[in-house]
Amino acid sequence: MNNPDLIFALGGAGALLAAVLPGVLSRLPFSLPLACLLGGLLLFLLPLPLPEVDPVAHRVALEHVTEICVVISLMGAGLAINRRLGLHSWSTTWRLLGGTMPLTVVAVAAVTAWLLGWPLAAAVLLGAVLAPTDPVLASDVQVGEPVDAENADDEVRFSLTSEAGLNDGLAFPIVYAAIAMAATGGTAWLGEWALVDVLYRISAGVLGGLLIGRLLGRLFFHAKTENLRLAEHRDGFVALASTFLAYGLTELVHGYGFIAVFVTACAIRNAERSHGYNGILHGFIEQIERLLTAWLLLLLGGFVAAGGLASLTWRGAAVALLLLLVIRPLTGWLVQLGGPAGPRERAVTSFFGIRGIGSLYYLAFALGQADFGVPQEELWAVAAFTVVVSIVLHGVTATPIMSRLDRLRGTPQPSSLAERDS
């Protein structure tokens, strides 16, 4: 039987490590997510009465925990972006969203069908699950805290942050397409899918986020009554309230809450760009994100330690490696040709297509909606292996590559998390 006292103690230890490790690892080729993953792996190898980590048996719990972690990270990403929205200023973002993401879905689905022989619905689902980059695990290659200067974000960090902020929501239509393919077959679902899952839900997410974000921004910074002008009270937990409010209201009208949360954050940021309250909101949400990420990655390490990758074949591993080493770098490079990024920036942006918690959420959600004709253990093994390899590969390379890029450009390196929080 699991010992609840032990779980409390380990939860506290994980939270403490989430606070200490960023400062310790800030200049080392070793990221916080990688440390948590390895910590979970070693912890669950010990003869301790720890809970079983089984995404099939605990699918519902996993879906909701990862959902919370993703929406919180989306709020943090939106609040951190200093660059104003625009067709030209966000050019790289639009290229990655409109080119790299659909090309990745098609390529992963094709490779999956070829190597693994899975049904089309399962292949499309895996493409949708693994296509979006992750806002949770990409802190080492994303923009830092909010500052006054709109040009403070370099092209690489800005592109990776804004891409991760939007493509999590934009993966949903493809997930719904895979669900429809598995549940109904044929093509009768295409019309409703295009009108509802693509046009309506995306529009509702964008418009809902704009409306909620502008109303909250006006309340925070420009309310006529001082008691309602929350920026004067400097309560950071309001960022959490904004996250859940935007997500919940948009989901109630069947829009994409992931998109709404990121757009809400950007709208709040634009309401008063130079106010110090932006930093307070971002700092609070960043701390919650780090805490949840640490706990989830400890569990992911436990999943690996308990034999969660036993169903992984060399063909499944090949799909993951092709995505991370060939498909994402190649498609990311191609769509940026002719864009504002230089050759070095294009290469780095293309390489750091980090996969993480969002992929686990989408898979948990989809498996609760339909049967895809593939053992769930196999789906989880391929998805989890992809996330694990991404954490290791990108966790080891992020600091040295970004530091070298900063030196080559002659720009000062961003402060570490510990320095920003102090």
Image (cartoon, helix red, strand yellow):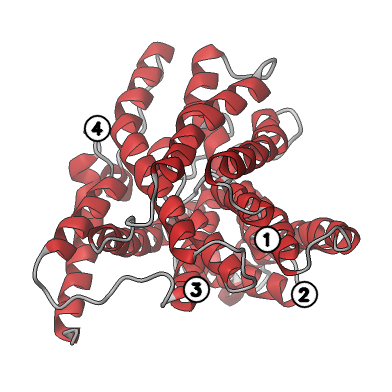
Report the amino acid beneath label 2.
Val
Q: Are marks 4 and 3 in contact (CB under 8 Å)?
A: no
Mark 4 residue element: loop
Circle 3 crowding by C-alpha within 10 Å: few under 14, some 14–19, many from 20: some
**Residue at which label 3 appears:** 64
Q: Nearer the viewer, residue 238 or 196?
A: 196
Q: Residues within 10 Å of mark 2 (few under 14, many from 20)?
A: few
Per the rendering, the mark at residue 140 is: none
Residue 82 image-quadrant placement: top right
* Residue 341 appears left or right of 35: right
- Most distant residue in the left direction: 47
N-terminal label among 2 and 3: 3
What's the residue at 61%, 27% (across, down)? Answer: 331
Per the rendering, the mark at residue 260 is 1
Local SS, label 1: helix
Q: Nearer the viewer, mark 2 or mark 3?
A: 3
Q: Which residue is mark 4?
A: 29
**Mark 1: which amino acid?**
Ala
> Is residue 238 shown left or right of residue 29?
right
Q: Earlier in the sequence, mark 2 or mark 1?
A: 2
* Place of residue 305 in the rendered image (x, y in percent of width and height, measured from the top left): 23, 59
* Percent of width and height locating residue 156: 51, 28
Name the residue: 49% across, 15% down: 344
Q: Disc 1 versus disc 4: distance between alpha carbons?
A: 34 Å
Residue to which mark 2 is pinned: 253
